[in-house]
Image (cartoon, helix red, strand yellow):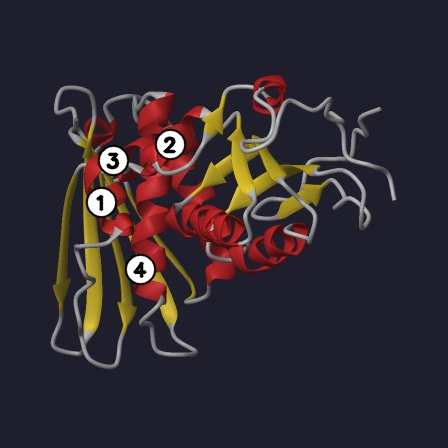
Amino acid sequence: MTTTAPAPRHGQIRVEGEPPPPGGSANTVLRLYGEIDSATTPALREHLFAALRPGLRLLVIDLSGITFCDVAGLAVLVGTRHRAERLGMELRLVGPRPQMRGTLRVTGLERVLTIHPTLARALADGPGETGCHPTPTHPRPR
Amino acid sequence: MTEEAAAPTAGATGVRDAVTVRMPADSAYLSVLRTATAGLAARLDFTLDEIEDLRIGVDEACAMLLSQALPGTDLTTEFELNGNGMRVAVSVLTADGRLPARDTFAWTVLSALAGDVNAHAGPDDRVTIVLHKHRDGVESA
């Protein structure tokens, strides 16, 4: 059941999805809404880093609700990926809109980050090192 | 600004279509400036893609300058709309008049999407980045 919370106010960002409980799911899906710029990146970085909990194998970030993302925002995504790699986890991004795709292309970061067109595709590929697990497609309610 | 100037040939009315926005040199105001940029660009015949390019260009230029702006000062953005497109000059007062580095992702995005880009420093260590986004014709990439 997806909640239809109002869009975040201008220049703000909202993160939906809960990290799984300890020993719970190996996958987490976070959905981002709003605008990512140097004003919103500190809070975003904190959210994303907090999602990299022990036991996690795959973090999927759904970007389809992001209406603007600048280089400061891309830096947070790259930083999250590096941190995930060090922890033996995988980061996949889903569905950036045209504005964000343009920035990813111009910077060449589209080749550094793993980007899937849809959430279904990102989850269908299964965790990188292990076999294909059935994966929950929505975040757990608290 | 005049309502009539929304006609494609703003120059024909004799009104100089120029707008200056001054706001605190703080990233909290970036989204306001992006909105102003999109609104002004819509007065010209920019495509939606070009308006997006301008929004990201102005955002990146400001973000670069904000990192070296003197605390408590303003960020000034001057928009000038003409027959060729839009010229945007963003400036802040700095401690040393250092120009933004060009070997960054931010400068890459700026120069790839926002048309002609230049930076200069004034005698009072005010650093300015100027973008000139042309309408139609002159395509980047």
Q: Earlier in the sequence, mark 4 or mark 2?
A: 2
Q: CA distance from mark 1 to mark 4?
A: 12 Å
For residue B122, which quarter of the picture? bottom left
What chain is tagged by disc 3? B
- The reply to whether the C-beta atoms of the residues labelled 4 and 2 are less than 8 Å apart is no
For residue A137, which quarter of the picture? top right
Q: Please determine if labels 1 and 2 lie on a single subunit.
A: yes
Give me the residue at 49% from left, 54% from top.
A86
- Badge 1 crowding class, 10 Å Cα cut-off, few under 14, some 14 to 19, many 20 or more, is some
Q: Which mark is residue B64?
A: 4
Q: For mark 1, what is the residue? A: B108
Q: Nearer the viewer, mark 4 or mark 2?
A: 4
Quick check: B31 left or right of A17?
left
* Local SS, label 2: helix
Q: Nearer the viewer, residue B130 or A22?
A: A22
Give the amino acid at mark 3.
Leu
Q: Please determine if labels 4 and 2 lie on a single subunit.
A: yes
Give me the residue at 57% from left, 21% from top.
A125
* Local SS, label 4: helix
Q: Is residue B22 visible?
A: yes
Give the amino acid at mark 4.
Met
Q: Nearer the viewer, mark 1 or mark 2?
A: 1
Q: Nearer the viewer, mark 1 or mark 3?
A: 1
Above or below residue B119? Residue A32 is above
Give me the residue at 33% from left, 61% from top.
B76
Above or below residue B89? Residue A25 is above
Q: Which mark is residue B113?
A: 3
Q: Earlier in the sequence, mark 1 or mark 4?
A: 4
* Local SS, label 1: helix
Q: For mark 2, what is the residue? A: B52
Q: Earlier in the sequence, mark 1 or mark 2?
A: 2
Q: Nearer the viewer, residue A50 or B130?
A: A50
